Amino acid sequence: MRKSEIRELLKVTQDPEIISFAGGLPNPKSFPIKDLEGVVISVLENHGRVALQYGTTQGLRELREAVTERAHKDGIETTADDVIITSGSQQALDTVGKVFLNPGDTALVGSPSYLGGINAFRSYEANLTGIPLDKDGMNIDVLEEKIKELLKNDILPKFIYVIPTFQNPAGVVMPESRRKKLIDVANEYDLIVVEDDPYEKLRFDIPPVKPVKAFDDEGRVVYMSTFSKILSPGFRLAWTIANEELTRKMIICKQALDLCTNTFTQFIANEFIRSGSLDLHIMKICEMYKPKRDIMISAMEKYFPDGYICNKPMGGMFAWVTLPEGIDTETMFLDAIKEKVAYVHGKAFHVDGGGGRSMRLNFSYSSNDQIEEGIKRLGTVIKRKLETRKAVL
Ligand SMILES: Cc1ncc(COP(=O)(O)O)c(C=O)c1O
């Protein structure tokens, strides 16, 4: 097992003087503390004896029903029986690894892809094959070629892991046509798709995009999403939607992990959804994050040297930046820390050693002023690096 680079980085960023674009943290000012006060009291008064008790491994039925209703609106056909409430999506990723992966098995992941997913799958000693992303997410033609190549060597990949909407880290969105193509490929080669969807509701400039699961008529997509980015990561609440057989297997695995997900927060989340507060809250978060995204993008235009590439993310929490030739964002990280600004370097998200010139910048966590100042500091670091390189050449 390897330690998580993001966790290690977050330690450095505990220094209050550092402006951190590193973690995938929601803005703490977005937490609906006042609204939750009433909900917490109501849960204790009306359900205290059950809410403070152990619950079922699959999760509170009322919350699974609430999740099901929301999934229907997104175009996913399911019932509460096929939903599991997990302790964060991170647990769902680990459970997927536990169900599918034996040492030496192969799984296909985006290049780049979410580090927590990569680490979870690696802990089961899987071989991870990277599939490149373009501006529309995972390149399905390359995916198909890779599958054929693996099959020629008698390797049947266990699943394809995708984050189709506001991808972490690249911020890109897979269009509907490509989602359908992904399902066609999965059907053709009889493969499972693991769809990780934490960011779709953090949409600023584009209409809703149907999840890949909405096009899945053979029950081969394991869908997961989380309350971490739309309510509170401290709740540790997420959910999976999968076919009956996989749901049963994942529940067995989860029993050994934690017996059950936090019962108290499940009750709170359920009441928060039922009162209509969650949808209002999501609107408020989007209103808060969109200007942050804009400030970050225009600060880059102001302070970064020519030659960097950053496509404006249409939602989510991350901007993905690729710097000019000759810059290694991994070694530049120490210079950035000296200037009191932090990011996650691109290599951390690649299973194939790519991403050396890239970095992920989170725009949700910092204040608007910090974003402007942090990008200014980063611009200074990058310019200095480029000048040193020129001098050497
Ligand atoms: C793509 C992706 N999947 C899963 C997670 C884990 O989320 P959770 O807090 O629900 O464990 C994150 C968190 O940043 C994420 O970005």
Image (tube, rainbow, N blue to C red):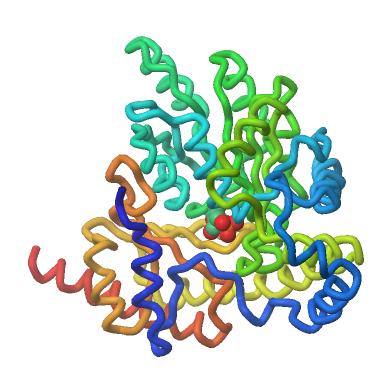
Residue 123, quarter of the rendered image? top left
Quadrant assignment, res 253? top right
- Percent coordinates x, y for residue 157 in the rendering: 44, 23
**Which is more toward the observer, 70 or 358?**
70
Kindly identify the residue that appears in the image at 73 percent across and 29 percent down. 215
Q: Is residue 205 visible?
A: no
Residue 359's x, y, as percent?
Answer: 38, 61
Position of 346 relative to 10 (above/below): above
Q: What residue is at 24 percent from the left and 61 percent from the top?
A: 327
Q: In which quarter of the image is residue 321?
A: bottom left
How many numbered circles does the render carry? 0
Percent position of residue 184, x then y: 63, 20
The answer to whether residue 96 is above or below residue 207 is above
Residue extending farthest to the left is 392
Depth check: give the residue in front, 387 or 99. 99
Identified at 49% across, 24% down, the residue is: 141
Q: Position of residue 151 (x, y in %)?
A: 40, 13
